[in-house]
Amino acid sequence: MITELMNWFTLNQRPMPWRTFSSPYWVWISEAMLQQTQVATVIPYFYRFVDQFPDIETLAAADSQAVLKVWEGLGYYSRARNLHRAAALIVTDFGGGIPSDYDTLQQLPGFGPYIAAAVASIAFEVPVPVVDGNVLRVFSRYWGIPDDIRAAKVRNDVFDRLTPLVAMAQPSQFNQAIMELGALVCTPKNPHCTQCPLATDCVALTTHQVSKFPFKSAKPPVPHYTIGVGVIWKDGKILIGRRRDDQMLGGLWEFPGGKQEGDESIQETISREVDEELGIKVAVGDCITVVKHAYTHFKITLHAYTCAWVEGVPVPQSAAELRWVDIDTLSDHPFPKANGRVIEAIKIQAGQLLEKSR
């Protein structure tokens, strides 16, 4: 099985920047970005990231806002915060060198079993298997594992079964080959079994049950929230708030607002939320835009309205920091994707108003 898999990978692996220059730092950054994100999306972000932060020392010394700004739009921002925190620890505790030990790596921020195994095996040839969604799918079919692949016991079982195999191969190539096989051949739907180097001994294929594997339990229903936010103007500036680091989307900036409650109108939501969050009164004006966005565990429809400051001094009761900023400097701050679309609409609206005034 190992020989066939290695031969297939040699001929079919996709060109990726972190494969052409496989430094431990590049492996770490790429694997962090590839969690929950497709390769095509990651590549331009990877280039921008390593261009701005070419080594661990530069990343460790960077301002957290600069790190989040480069990551802006890639999502799952805890990955960026953990990269920054781990870089600082690697510099102070390990002299700037990423440790190669699998267990030691897991003591660093953001290094769960998957990232630790990927960095240890790909960067340092440590014989430890990587078990991600692709790997679970490949081997649930290959070994005919009937259990729910969401269950920890299945992940642990696959890890244990792969451990002696990865020790018999070149760990970096073996792990990358399995992940690549899952991405290109053993796909979730309509797998290309005739192209698979493991087809001969695949239980799912030889028993004509490919469609039954892997078994994955259904996710619970995804809730939806209606959100109202205010683009609050005062003396030509807009008020924005930075989320606390311990919150979802921590460190990113946003427009004040929150969830609609009961039978209140979206304008009433904005007025109430601004009062509760900031302690100020605003006059809610026209709708700027409506944005639909999906996160991992919920969906939102975000309504953004122009607001005029009326009275009060804004106090960051739920935010880490508040700022009044010019419209031209809004984009200097890292925003979540949905808020980014609001900024685009604000600038379009401002441009239209400027044209009318001429």
Image (cartoon, rainbow, N blue to C red):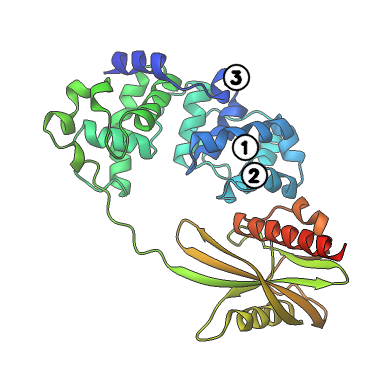
Picture disc at residue 214: none
Percent x, y for residue 182?
35, 32
Q: Nearer the viewer, residue 110 or 134?
A: 134
Picture disc at residue 45: 1
| Residue at 70% across, 47% down | 69
Secondary structure under the numbered disc 1 in the rendered image: helix
Residue picked out by circle 2: 71
Image quarter for residue 246?
Answer: bottom right
Query: Would you place residue 219 above or below residue 161 in this image?
Result: below
Q: Is residue 208 left or right of residue 58?
A: left
Percent x, y for residue 120?
50, 28
**Labels 1 & 2 near each other (Cβ < 8 A):** yes
Q: In this view, does 117 lie to the left or right of 71?
A: left
Q: Is residue 105 left or right of residue 307?
A: left
Percent x, y for residue 45?
62, 37
Secondary structure under the numbered disc 2 in the rendered image: helix
Residue picked out by circle 3: 21
Density class for disc 1 (Cα within 10 Å; few <14, some 14-19, many ≥20) is some
Query: Would you place residue 257 above or below residue 52 in this image?
Result: below
